[in-house]
Image (cartoon, rainbow, N blue to C red):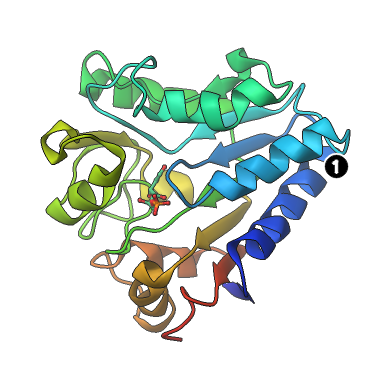
Amino acid sequence: MELHVFDTIQEASQLAKDVFVKAINENPGCLLGLATGSTPEVLYGLLIEAYKNGEVSFKDVRTVNLDEYVGLGPEHNQSYRYFMNSNLFDHIDIDKNNTNVPDGIGGPEQNAKKYDALLESLGQPDIQLLGIGGNGHIAFNEPGSSFDSTTSIIDLTEETIKANSRFFENIDDVPKKAVSMGIKSILKAKKILLLAFGESKAQAVKDMFELPVTENMPATALKNHPDVMVIVDKAAASLL
Ligand code: F6R
């Protein structure tokens, strides 16, 4: 894993943006694995800016997202489909038919199976973007998730529900389950970019680097991948 530490989230996101823009310009029909949450917000803003400046076009780009809350439809303003549309897709020239987020509505197990079949048919993502949970989760693969997992239904931990309650009016409104790409599927990408910002991620970043590979700390699975860039700000790197 290659570590890049920056003073600010802006500078860190700039590097991630450069990696994405280069990959798209080299292969305009590339497949990008995307994430939601606070972490990629600045990066998505920079990608929108790059599109508006004529630096890049997303016309033929295809995307797959990591996860979705079970029970939230695309119109729910906390669903990850809504997040992707409002933070990125609505502002660039991507064809929304080429963008994929797991379904939150409908039979969860069926949705997971359907998403796996879709991932299989789309092939290997060129880049997979990841954030990291304070407990080391990647996508919604919580501690203890099998490294052999494909798309599945995850029971969110109390810690994750609490962390994500900042986006909801009431903690009881936070869904308790998510449909999430599995660790095995995440590791299939040619290149992985993990971003982590702020003090609340410092312990997870330290554990990811320093612990041996263990299912108790999902992000350690990334040590089994040959091309991982970890891009962090100073606060997230403070315990290294
Ligand atoms: C989101 C995702 C999660 C987040 C993680 C960090 O699609 O898969 O793993 O990346 O929970 O969330 P933020 O960025 O909000 O701190």
Residue 155: x and y in percent read: 16, 42
User: Which one is nearer the viewer's eye here, 32 or 121?
Assistant: 32
Number of numbered tags placed on the structure image: 1
Q: Residue at x 33, y 51 (%)?
A: 148
Question: Residue 189: in sight, yes or no?
Answer: no
Residue 126 location, quadrant: top right
Q: Is residue 132 left or right of residue 71?
A: right
Q: Residue at x 42, y 44 (%)?
A: 37
Question: Residue 31: in sight, yes or no?
Answer: yes
Q: Residue at x 34, y 76 (%)?
A: 203
Amino acid type for the residue under numbered disc 1 = Glu
User: Which one is nearer the viewer's eye here, 69 or 146?
Assistant: 69
The vertical placement of 40 against 5, above or below, is above
Quadrant where the N terminus is found in the figure: bottom right
Outermost residue, front direction?
Answer: 169
Residue 112 location, quadrant: top left
The vertical placement of 88 against 98, above or below, is below
Outermost residue, bottom direction?
Answer: 240
Q: Mark 1 near ligand 1 (CB under 8 Å)?
A: no
Q: Residue at x 53, y 26 (%)?
A: 86
Residue 192: x and y in percent read: 58, 55
Q: Is residue 19 left or right of residue 129?
A: right
Residue 127: x and y in percent read: 63, 47
The vertical placement of 22 against 49, above or below, is below
Residue 189: x and y in percent read: 57, 48
The vertical placement of 100 against 190, above or below, is above
Residue highlighted by disc 1: 26
Q: Is residue 58 left or right of residue 208?
A: right
For mark 1, give the secondary structure. Answer: helix
Residue 26 location, quadrant: top right
Disc 1 residue crowd, few under 14, some 14–19, many 20+, Cα 10 Å: few
